[in-house]
């Protein structure tokens, strides 16, 4: 700026700040009129705020520290009655703070004294397996319904999804045994009519036939009874 032009132009200030000339003019006029106070936010237009910060804090505390007398968890309706707010206001506040009283998760604490060491071993196998080692996660999915749809299947068309007849024929249930190679993303799977020790042993033999003989194999299993039977332990 020169002595003849003590102030930068609106266009130049706008280019430096990434805003338009109108915005620069507005804030400059507010500063000239009210000085520093003019740079603060002006009162918003519209209806004044009805729910204050202390009301939000009270609702959150009520959600976290109490339960309704006639139910196992709060709903938006019951919380609206208890807090005096509208149901939509309760829902907005819960969403803003990530509160979902209708959901719960279960957990189990292991009594195994070597639990931490075992977790470290398993995580280490997943994240950094030794060379020439194949790590497989093995489990089964029982009671899968084997259903056959009746009638014609209409294929997908532009703007239309695939359509199937609602009726079907039951062919009993089946059990899927699967071994997942977490590193490669491949699956060795086979279905059996049941999930006894005999079927699990047969599946392990199927896995053995599908992996290279020069690899050491680590199987990660849960504590299901068929996984710990003597027949399986002796064969492995």
Image (cartoon, rainbow, N blue to C red):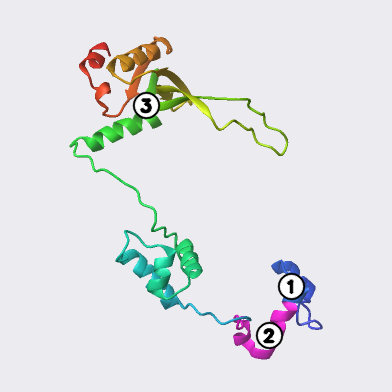
Considering depth in this image, is 109 or 153 the residue closer to the camera? 153
Q: Quick check: 99 left or right of 111?
A: right
**SS for callout 2:** helix
Which quarter of the image is occupied by the N terminus?
A: bottom right
- The residue at the point 68 percent across, 90 percent down is 33
Reply yes or no: does residue 32 show up in magenta. yes
- The residue at the point 48 percent across, 26 percent down is 185
Q: Which mark is residue 87?
A: none
- The residue at the point 39 percent across, 68 percent down is 60
Question: Where does label 1 land, which residue?
Answer: 13
Q: Do the residues labelled 1 and 3 touch (CB within 8 Å)?
A: no
x, y percent for residue 109: 24, 43
Question: Where does label 3 land, which residue?
Answer: 142
Q: In which quarter of the image is residue 214?
A: top left
Sequence-first disc among 1 and 3: 1
Q: Do the residues labelled 2 and 3 touch (CB within 8 Å)?
A: no
Q: In which quarter of the image is residue 124?
A: top left
Local packing at callout 1 (Cα closer than 10 Å; few below 14, some 14-19, many 20+) is: some
Span highlighted in magenta in the image? 24-44
Question: Where does label 2 land, which residue?
Answer: 30
**SS for callout 3:** strand
**SS for callout 1:** helix
How many numbered discs, if any? 3
């Amino acid at each position: 700026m020169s002595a003849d032009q003590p102030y930068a132009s609106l266009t130049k200030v706008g280019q430096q700040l990434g805003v338009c000339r109108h915005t620069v003019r507005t804030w400059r006029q507010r500063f000239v009129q009210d000085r520093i106070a003019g740079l603060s936010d002006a009162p918003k237009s519209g209806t004044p705020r009805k729910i204050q910060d202390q009301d939000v804090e009270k609702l959150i505390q009520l959600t976290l520290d109490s339960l309704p007398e006639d139910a196992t968890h709060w709903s938006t309706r019951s919380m609206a009655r208890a807090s005096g707010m509208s149901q939509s206001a309760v829902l907005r506040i819960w969403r803003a703070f990530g509160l979902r009283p209708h959901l719960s998760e279960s957990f189990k604490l292991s009594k195994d004294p070597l639990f931490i060491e075992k977790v470290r071993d398993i995580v280490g196998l997943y994240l950094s397996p030794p060379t020439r080692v194949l790590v497989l996660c093995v489990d089964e999915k029982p009671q899968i319904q084997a259903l056959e749809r009746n009638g014609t299947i209409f294929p997908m068309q532009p703007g239309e999804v695939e359509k199937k007849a609602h009726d079907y024929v039951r062919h009993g249930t089946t059990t899927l045994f699967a071994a997942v190679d977490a590193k490669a993303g491949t699956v060795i799977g086979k279905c059996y009519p049941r999930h006894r020790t005999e079927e699990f042993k047969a599946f392990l033999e199927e896995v053995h036939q599908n992996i290279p003989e020069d690899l050491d194999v680590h199987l990660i299993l849960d504590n299901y009874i068929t996984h710990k039977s003597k027949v399986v332990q002796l064969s492995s």
